[in-house]
Amino acid sequence: MSTYQNAWIPTEEQKKQTRLFQWMNRLGFDDYESFHQKTVTDIDWFWDKALKELEYEWHENYDETLDLSKGIAHPNWFVGGKTNVVHNALDKWADHPGTKGQTALYWEGDNGDRVTYTYEELQAEVNAYAQGLEDLGIGEEDIVTLYMPMIPETLIAMLAVSKVGAIFSPAFSGYKSEAVATRIQAAKSKALLTADGFFRRGKTVRMKDEADLAADQCPSLEHVIVVERASLEVDWNEHRDVTWSSLRKNVTGYKTVVKQADDPFMLIYTSGTTGKPKGAVHTHAGFPVKSAFDAGICMDVKKDDTLFWYTDMGWMMGPFLVYGGLVNGASIVMFEGTPDYPKPDRLWEIVERYHVTHLGISPTLVRAMMKHGEDWIHNHDLRSLKMIGSTGEPWNPEPWQWLFKHAGHSQVPIFNYSGGTEISGGMLGNVLIKPIQPVTFNAALPGMDVSVFNESGGPVWNEVGELVLRKPWVGMTKGFYEEPERYEETYWSRFKDTWVHGDWATQDEQGYFTITGRSDDVLNVAGKRLGPAEVESVLVEKEEVIEAGVIGVPHAVKGEEAVGFVVLKTAPTEALMEEITLHLEQKLGKALAPKKVFAVDDLPKTRNAKVMRRAIKSAYLNKPTGDLSALENPEAVDQIRSLGLKNSTHS
């Protein structure tokens, strides 16, 4: 049984209005469980129906939905089919009289700049730059790394690269040169697209300086294309650099290159928490279909809706925003800035201004907003919101309830969403035809054959195990770029014909899932598995605690013990820290509760507000931290390192 109560229960009317319910009905199903069972037992039937429901269009139709002749780890989808993602995300809407004038993109800069593009206007820009890329010598199978802020040119470039049949590879805009160079070298990119700089919290971030340092290390690069976003004076390499504006050609049309369904269109590298980053290969009828399915059918994004996910194009939710929105003919919002600048209500201001219907944020971001109080939310009219999506990490109950109550007035469902870069979207979610509880996921998504396995590879209920997938799905990465053995080792080596995702999770008899953390984050205290999110949830129950991070450190007797780090509303006192420790003992028992809890000014977070436990652990144990270029606040690591050195009984 789940430990949580239903927070949101759809009415019959609400259920019937969803795309998911209406589609299920047309396919002859009236309950989700029997429908889901069919989607995972007859997967080629299901994905064929899904494509038709999304109205995904083909230049030449496919002969066969699924070919598994190379085994479950290497499916070939839509054999013989020819298409291009740009046709489905842009051209078909721009070429249609009924949709060409609809808004495709709302963009807002950190400094308040605003631009809007209709589908027709966006197509004109994409065509102009596609011709420019072709003239520069960028063509089929060439790889273009995008090291870009969230500006309109980023979207135009992604679509233009696909239009000419090339492959784009997005890199996080906050990376330093070393991390960018690693990705360019791994991909052997022919061109790098970057900006002179961008605006963040009212400051100008110089971007080309880092891009140049990266480019100098990458002999495969022939061109560095520079968008003049911030009008900065930059060093100019006459042999390599070209301005973005110079690529814009005066063309009325550009014929979209026709590709095979399983031809790559995107190469996206994971953040490289251990070892060198892995390049997930995604195809023209893979990632865009899965993203569009999850957004459109599961999250109920429709043509007149507006989707805004607060993210970066270097994270998988950036491309998800693009294809989840545009393949469904909806509008998307891209935002260059931060959710609390210049005031703590910037995010809610954007939701109100663009009538956002579907908003995506992370639990850490919500915890950060809680400290500003709820008045900042209540100052805005958020009645446009139909759904709030959340991904990136497990929830704690209190921030979930806070968001549900104040942003959605306890009426707007929160769609917890978990999957990953190699998935192209979600494994688990909160489908809008079932009751939703805080923290948990109410379903495995259609087509995703999810289970929780014990160490022997058997399914378990009501106990923590490995989250796995037992069938292939559309959007599954087509391996790691030029590393086939690493792909098989990472996902397929543990249990036969089973994708092991790397998350610990539980599943109850009602079909509710809870993710307790990454497998490599999970603590083993005296033989008992303990998810860091469980301990963090107990810590943030205390009113004085804004947010918490928990790691496991070596212990001579228990093998491992938990250590907690908390950000407090007030200055720490000895009495308060003792109170927090006692609270942990009462909730978790003395054997599992952390004996050490430290107050810190901040927890190390990525730009998309995800707490990086790996950075906490390596700093506390005074070990090499690896690639921390994704961190928003590296100074947080220094404070934790000094605490570790003062308390170094764990070595």
Image: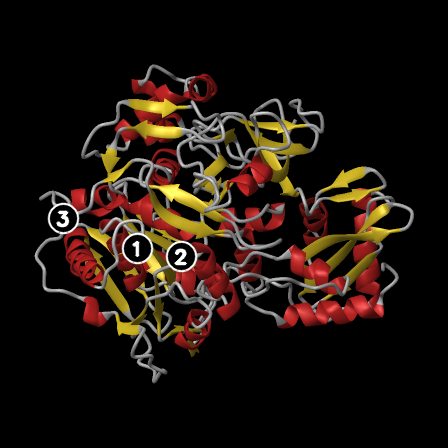
Secondary structure state at the residue bearing disc 1: helix
Q: Which mark is residue 170?
A: 2
Where, quadrant-wise, is the N terminus in this rendering? top right
Query: Along the polypeptide, which appears first: circle 3 or circle 1?
Result: 1
Where, quadrant-wise, is the C terminus in this rendering? bottom right
Secondary structure state at the residue bearing disc 2: strand
Does the CB distance between marks 2 and 1 fall below 8 Å? yes
In the rendered view, would you say 394 is above or below 171?
A: above
* Residue sitting at x 55%, y 52%: 363
Secondary structure state at the residue bearing disc 3: loop
Q: Nearer the viewer, residue 127 or 320?
A: 127
> Label 3 sits on what residue type?
Lys
> Label 2 sits on what residue type?
Pro
Image coordinates of residue 242 in percent, x first then y, are 27, 73
In the rendered view, would you say 253 is above or below 181?
A: above
> Label 1 sits on what residue type?
Met
Residue for badge 1:
158
Residue 56 in sight = no
In space, the residues marked 2 and 1 are separated at their CA atoms by: 9 Å
In space, the residues marked 3 and 2 are separated at their CA atoms by: 24 Å
Position of 563 with respect to 507 (left or right) is: right
Q: Quadrant of residue 305?
A: top left
Label 1 crowd bin: few (<14), some (14–19), many (20+), radius 10 Å? many
Does the CB distance between marks 3 and 2 fall below 8 Å? no
Residue for badge 3:
255
In space, the residues marked 3 and 1 are separated at their CA atoms by: 16 Å
